[in-house]
Image: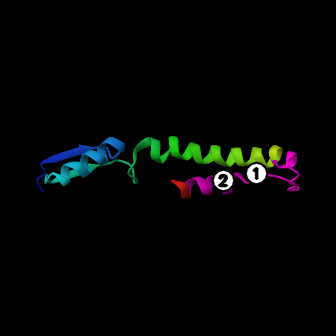
Amino acid sequence: MNHDLVIIGAGPGGYIAAIRAAQLGLNVACIEKERMLGGTCLRVGCIPSKALLESSELYKEAEHTFKDRGINVGSLSLDLEKMLSQKDRTV
């Protein structure tokens, strides 16, 4: 199979370049070594870490701020497995 353009890496730059080249009429192949597109930021960096940070912030809020506002939540605990599962669903 012949291609006009082969892009190596389907991170933010790669997949956008592939889409734009295809829109311009080129026959494009985009090669990615990982099973998911999106690059490091989307798959294991920025987005996953922000999902975990959000869960941590909610825990802190429940632990401290709720009590100050008269909201009693009883015994508070973390379920790391569920937090990681939520992170995976976010990504």
Q: Is residue 83 magenta?
A: yes
Badge 1 amino acid: Leu
Location of residue 79 by image quarter: bottom right
Where does residue 69 sit, x and y in percent of width and height?
A: 85, 49
Mark linked to residue 83 = 2
Where does residue 7 sit, x and y in percent of width and height?
A: 24, 44
Q: Which residues are magenta?
A: 66-88
In the rendered image, the vertical position of residue 11 relative to residue 27, given as above or below: above
Which of the pair 5/16 is nearer the observer? Answer: 16
Left or right: residue 11 compared with residue 86: left
Q: For the N terminus, which image quadrant?
A: bottom left
Which of the pair 88/20 is nearer the observer? Answer: 20
Look at 30% across and 48% down and name the residue there.
15
Look at 19% across and 46% down and name the residue there.
6
Q: Is residue 21 among the parts visible in the rendering?
A: yes
Residue at disc 1, secondary structure: loop
Look at 86% across and 54% down and name the residue there.
71
Q: Check whether the beta carbons of the residues at disc 2 and disc 1 lie within 8 A of each other.
A: yes
Residue at disc 2, secondary structure: helix
